[in-house]
Image (cartoon, grey):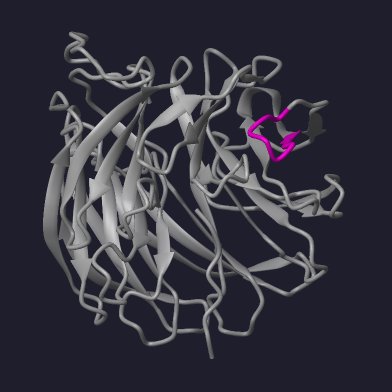
Amino acid sequence: MKKLQFSTFACLVLSAAFLPSASANHRTGTIIAPELIVAGDFNQDGNMDLAVNCTGFDVVAILFGDGQGGFTLGGHFPVDTLTKGLQVGDVNTDGHLDLVNCATWGYDETVLLGDGLGSFHTAKPPTEVDGDGEPVRLLLRDFNNDGRFDIAVNAPDDSKVVLYFGDGKGNFPGPDLEIGGVQHPFGMDSADLNGDGNLDMAVGGPVNGAGNSKTTIMLGDGAGGFQISAFSVQDQPTSNKIGDLTNDGIPDIVVAGAQPGNTTGNYISTYIGNGRGGFALGQTLQLGAGNLKGDIALGDFDEDGNLDVAYPQTGIQVERQHGTKVFLFFGDGHGHLAAGPVLTVGQEPHTVIAVDVNHDGHLDLAVSNRTDGTVSVLLGDGRGNFTLSSTTSVLSPIP
């Protein structure tokens, strides 16, 4: 049976010395702290590339893949102040992949329109995000079934999710739709959770205090409206990912997170869906000291037909020390996970994504390392083993 798979703070500036550039929108220099990663063939050479946002320096870095697991820095493209969320899709329907980024201080969405050659220019005007919600994540999906990409952006400080509907030309002109009652929204993912053919959302709500954190389920009506419900989860959920953990064709949810200073450290919980938008706890794994700031990844890493989890350990509970590990957990097809290999990457791994970068049909991993200012790529063998293939710096000036 084919497995269902469902979609994907501050940045320290070391040097702001810019070099000459061939494009007004093409920024070069020395930066650090890559965070969120998305993958796509941005220069249409048939090889998977990576885009990584860098908070503080306000750029998205593009890394071009060689189809064998190697990557080179291809460009820095400016976005609005304090970049956070990052998504990829063809928002202007020209056949080229574009990028959408949300910014916390500027409250704007920056749309970077791709030219199919690996370069991007900013769509004008930017989509303004109203209020003081401090957006940190977004989704790029078609929420109103008109065949065009829309944006859902979280606003944790305002406890709402805001939708901006796309016109298919790279613009999101509004009016926007604000959906309140979403407790401190953070990690987000989307899929059809109740089988009605419309996209829904699962949104994590990290709140201090045992029993206070929730995951909000937003059931879409296909016209941009949502019905809200919620269930309690472990403390401080940072990442929510949707996938079929039980191979029954019904979406389930993996919730992961940690509260820095909490003695229980990292955790992963699985919640099994009933196909009607309801979820029940399957399992919680306590992973020991540490914390998670970015996103986990789901994928069938050992190709046994069951979804597995890759978990980046952002930090450890020792002052001024960062994690350097990505933990693998193998699924049993019944909603339970078992510990697998531990992979060594750079310092302070923030986010991991699963993607085949070398055309061998096996899932590989790309990991952003905040402190190192690098992206690690590990090649999978289809049996659950990974080998470091490349470590690409986003610090180096572009030739």
Q: Is residue 174 visible?
A: yes
Q: Is residue 347 above or below residue 112?
A: below
- Residue displayed at 12% across by 59% down: 388
Depth order, front residue of 343/236: 343
**Quarter of the rendering occupied by the N terminus:** bottom right
- Residue 208: x, y in percent? 54, 34
Q: Is residue 214 visible?
A: no
**Residue 222 shown left or right of residue 171 in the figure:** right
Along the viewing direction, whichever of 382 and 92 lies nearer the viewer: 92
Q: Is residue 188 shown left or right of residue 25?
A: right
- Name the spot of residue 29 as percent of width and height, x first: 20, 17
Q: Is residue 329 magenta?
A: no
Q: Which residues are magenta?
A: 164-172
Picture layout, residue 75 above or below residue 217: above
Residue 171 at x, y = what percent?
Answer: 67, 29
Query: What's the magenta bit mostly, secondary-structure-wise?
Result: loop
Residue 236 location (% of width, % of height): 50, 41
Q: Which image quarter: residue 15?
A: top left
